[in-house]
Image (cartoon, rainbow, N blue to C red):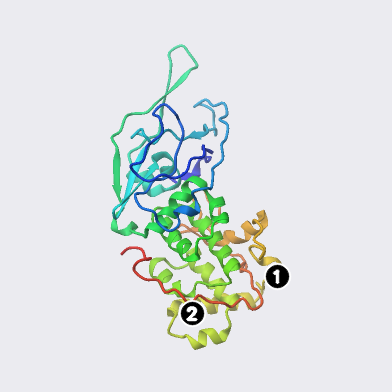
Amino acid sequence: MSLAASPSPTLAFMELSAKKSGSSSSPPNQEIPIFAEASSAPDVTSAYDNVGPQITTARSFTPDSPGIQPERFLAPMTDPRNTVHIILNQNVYMVHRDILCHYSIYFQNVLPDQRPIYKKLPNSNVHICIRLPLQSQYFHLPPELQTSEQVLDLFMAWLYHGARFFANCTVMAKYFIQLWVFASRIKCAKCQNDCIAAIERCRLRDGIIQTTWVSWIYQHTHSSCGLRRLLVDQCAWNLSTDYFLEHPLVFPPQFLLDVLVATRRGLSGAVLSADHNVWAASGSPPTEGTCGRLARYWVGDDTGDFGEQEDGVCVEERPLEVGREKDSGVVDTHEVPGSEDGMGR
């Protein structure tokens, strides 16, 4: 069952800097969450050390109230019932089980059920919450989920900070591309959609289209996925014809066909207007309208909130929405994806 099928509970946090595995922990009786911990210091760790989450107030709640869920307070990570250790190579990441299962259908299925059991006291309206004890769990990422430490760090930061972390960081677009693929494998649609926005933001910020990652993307994604269509539209509307003629062997044949179809569709009526840039060059935050224009690249959930679904991909027909800019046909010619950044090594 999709995690988005029920109302998403608000995550309540208290700000605390990320710590390395094995460092001193919070007092057992103090109910405050901390960030994911790693035994090494990947490149992007410092980027989210100072991004503090929000604190929210719990509302009144009864388990029988239809459509209402309590605010989600993350319990101390010192309690093994609350955490899971994710192991990648020699690094151990400690993360709250509840938040991981809330966003990822994959982890919801593979980790033991930790949903609380509510019991009503006899002759009373008082409900008590019961959690069965579990041993500390260590989860080794299987081969199909192997990725780089930078990408997993980025995912951990997203778990605790959400899309606003992506909007305020300076991480390169290649990490968002890899994170989109990782999120697709753990069935985390919200992270995939936030990566789409971050990739387009990077294009506007750096003036670079990630053409060197086209082959890698086509090897690790299926047809019609949002990541493919985003890159196809970026290339179709911002690269010159001469570039494709000069580099005919750089791109997969299917990609060139997709660019041709996207260009033809645009010329047949879905011509972009001047206000279709996703974000202004000044880096102003997206409005509701710009988010709506990016929705054609989103992954939907079981509730169909993002339109018609086909193999987990939003296939609703809409005009091309990626902005076309004058003299913006800058391509990424400096980095070629290798095994150190790839997935499924």
Side of 45 where 326 appears, left or right: right
The foreground one among 61 and 243 is: 243
Residue 76 x, y percent position in the rendering: 41, 33
Q: Which mark is residue 256?
A: 2
Crowd band around label 1 with a 10 angstrom C-alpha radius: few (<14), some (14–19), many (20+): few
Residue, x 45% and y 62% (percent of image)?
A: 175
The amino acid beneath tag 2 is: Leu
Which residue corresponds to mark 1?
A: 273
Judge whether 166 appears above or below 13 on screen. below
Judge whether 342 appears above or below 236 on screen. above
Residue, x 36% and y 71% (percent of image)?
A: 338
Judge whether 201 appears above or below 328 on screen. above
The foreground one among 65 and 128 is: 128
Residue 268 x, y percent position in the rendering: 64, 77
Query: Which quadrant: the C terminus?
Result: bottom left
Q: Earlier in the sequence, mark 2 or mark 1?
A: 2
SS at circle 1: loop
Residue 335 x, y percent position in the rendering: 44, 73
